[in-house]
Image (cartoon, helix red, strand yellow):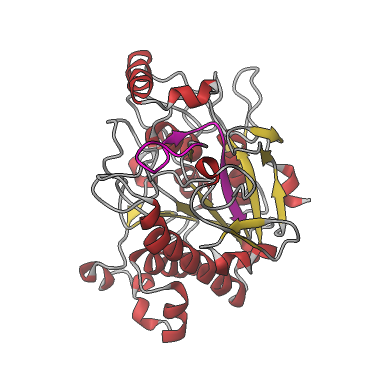
Amino acid sequence: MSRNERRTEPDQLRLDRRDFLRLGGVGLGAWELLGSRATTLAAPNSSDRSVILLMLVGGPSQLETWDPKPDAPLEVRGPFDSIATSIPGVRISEHLPRLASRMDKIALIRSMNHDEAPIHETGLQLLQTGRVSREDDQAHFGAAAAKLLGGVPGFVVTPGPIRNTGVQLPKGQTAGDLGVEFGPKFLDPDRLDILAADSALDLSREPEEVRESYGATPFGRRCLAARRMVEAGVRVVTVNMYDTVFDAVSWDCHGTRPFSTFEDYRQVVLPTFDRAFSGLLDDLEARGLLSTTLVAAVGEFGRTPRINTSGGRDHWPGVWSAAMAGGGVRGGQVVGASDGRASAPVDRPVSPLEWLATVHQVLGLQTSSIGDVVPAAAIHELFS
């Protein structure tokens, strides 16, 4: 059993949470991509770039989504089969058939990882702000875009903020010290009282076939609303697929209630994600917006490589997968690789800071060094 795998046992997980709270969150050294000590500039060619972040709250299992291990033992590979994709030799979950046929548009990163505490809040903070903080929320990259690039508004989160994920720590979805005026506007396309004031969310203006392509689910409607908002000039839209991991279906598949199960994945989570994400890609491409809009789908960590005694998987920041499409990203490729159990990177490890630097690059945000520390570089393979 590896060092990371030991961390996921219940007693050790509680210890990690206590230690994290006691230490206050060390983060990744002195690296800060946003905040009062960083100087962030807008590049000259950023005028037409937007980002849609599909925040897969709960932490999707890499083995049941983008990085199946069909030759591994059953207790590792899990209950699902894998299927071929439009990329020769690349297989993904059998429950993502629409995305499998669109892999020529998608770049997979199979080597995301971090060494922080295996709790939702650390991953959410790292991906969206570049830092781990115990008390003061740091600025989401959307807030920086709103401040430097403008927009109408510049930064939207739909349908609302992430609620309880287990530890009372920031979730990384505010403007931090950049100022509340650059914080997210929370817009819910299912709220009729909002629709009267925000025509970009009035999905009834869309043809029926377009609405159907996203799926008749809250997540599908939020993805369609995100496309409408980008079309209206919003720079950054974060779509929270779920707002909690307790007493609700989500990606947090520990195997028993109040969390999700593999059956929830099979019946609800994966089909919903498959349809909405593929519908969004098709719609953006049809409207000529995919080349200028980065769509990034990522969760805050992965899941344990061995199925637990409840028939699920626990938290695992040792390795997980992310998908990126549009915004200049070259689809049809895989960056990095995990080992045969999807437990650790074995090729091209990618940190959340590198992922965030890539988002910055697409938006045209140039982040200066802090003291003598050089910020993470973007994932250059995605654009080659």
Q: Residue furthest left?
A: 193
Question: Quick check: is 297 in the magenta stretch?
Answer: no
Q: Is residue 101 left or right of residue 305?
A: right
Residue 114 in sight in this render: yes
**Up/down of 7 relative to 200, above or below:** above
Depth order, front residue of 247/83: 83
- The residue lying toward the viewer, choosing from 265 and 48, is 265
Task: Give residue 241's position: percent from left, percent from top.
Answer: 38, 55
Residue at x 47%, y 45% (from the top left corner): 299
| Left/right of residue 197 with respect to residue 42 in the rendered view | left
Q: In percent of the image, x 61 and y 18: which residue is there?
A: 371
122 relative position to 256: left or right: right
- Vertical comparison of 302 with 226: above or below: above
Q: Position of residue 112 (x, y in %)?
A: 59, 38
Residue bounds of the magenta highlight? 306-324
Q: Position of residue 165 (x, y in %)?
A: 31, 39
Magenta stretch, main secondary structure, is loop
Q: Horizontal placement of 149 versus 206: left or right?
A: right
Against 264, residue 24 (above or below) is above
Q: Can you see residue 365?
A: no
